[in-house]
């Protein structure tokens, strides 16, 4: 409301200045212009329209050129800003892909892929589960439906390494089958809503932006 009143006051002043230039004295030569009431109203409306537009444009341009201070960065954003070449959207896109690839590799006993994407400790734990399943002749199946949520929940830097925790809320169909094909765990007709919190690690001095999975929690 205050801005609208200010705009109106300034516009009125500018209009009368322009009307004076048109109808009043210009330079050293007196000049008189007679207008009908209808013509005066048209001239006034024209000048008002032009003046309001110019004034509002000037305000808008001023706001663009003079940014308003935003609220302070959160602790999370402050930490993320310290990671070289970090981009939140790119990271979350990669995290989604990593989640799908690691989950699929684990259930398919693809240890070669796991070695690339997870830490040695996580890889060892996954290998133990894979070997036990193979010994029991159990196969795992996962039908990945999609994500309901993928969000960075924590970030910290210590010992020249960055750690980012991501909460994944996904929809999956998980089944364990015996050698006969019988379902011994899970339901192939039931979609589970699963929440996982994974932590990824990357050296601050790394030449690549690849992240390694170092922790998983349910």
Image: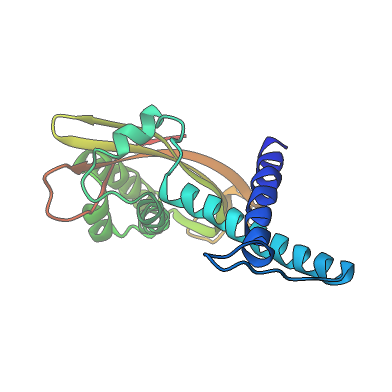
Q: Position of residue 145 (x, y in %)?
A: 57, 59
Quarter of the image for residue 73 reads top left
Q: How is the image coloured?
A: rainbow
Does 192 sit left or right of 119 as displayed? Answer: right
- Please say whether residue 11 is visible from this viewpoint: yes
Above or below, comparing residue 202 to residue 41 in the picture: above
Q: Position of residue 136 (x, y in %)?
A: 40, 49
Question: Where, quadrant-wise, is the N terminus in this rendering?
Answer: top right
The quarter holding residue 94 reads bottom left
Q: Residue at x 14, y 29 (%)?
A: 159
Residue drawn at x 26%, y 53% as measured from the top left = 117
Whether 213 is drawn above or below 189: the answer is: above
Residue 175 seen from this side: no
> Image point 35% across, 52% down: which residue?
91
In the image, residue 92 sits, relative to residue 26, either above or below, namely above
- Residue sitting at x 71%, y 60%: 48
Left-right relation of 82 to 61: left
Q: Is residue 151 above or below residue 114?
A: above
């Amino acid at each position: 409301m205050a801005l609208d009143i200010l705009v109106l006051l300034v516009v009125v002043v500018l209009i009368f200045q322009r009307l004076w230039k048109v109808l009043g004295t210009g330079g050293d030569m007196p000049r008189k212009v007679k207008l009908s009431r209808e013509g005066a109203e048209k001239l006034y409306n024209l000048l008002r329209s032009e003046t309001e537009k110019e004034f509002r444009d000037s305000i808008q341009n001023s706001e663009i050129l003079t940014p308003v201070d935003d609220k302070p960065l959160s602790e999370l954003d402050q930490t993320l800003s310290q990671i070289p070449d970090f981009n939140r959207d790119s990271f979350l896109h990669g995290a989604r892909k990593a989640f799908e690839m690691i989950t699929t590799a684990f259930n398919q006993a693809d240890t070669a892929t796991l070695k690339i994407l997870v830490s040695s400790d996580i890889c060892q734990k996954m290998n133990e589960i894979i070997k036990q399943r193979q010994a029991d002749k159990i196969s795992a199946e996962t039908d990945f439906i999609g994500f309901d949520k993928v969000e960075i929940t924590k970030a910290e830097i210590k010992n020249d390494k960055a750690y980012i925790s991501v909460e994944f809320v996904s929809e999956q169909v998980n089944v364990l089958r015996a050698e006969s094909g019988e379902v011994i765990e899970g339901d192939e007709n039931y979609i589970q809503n699963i929440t996982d919190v994974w932590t990824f690690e990357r050296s601050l001095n790394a030449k690549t932006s690849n992240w390694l999975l170092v922790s998983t929690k349910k």
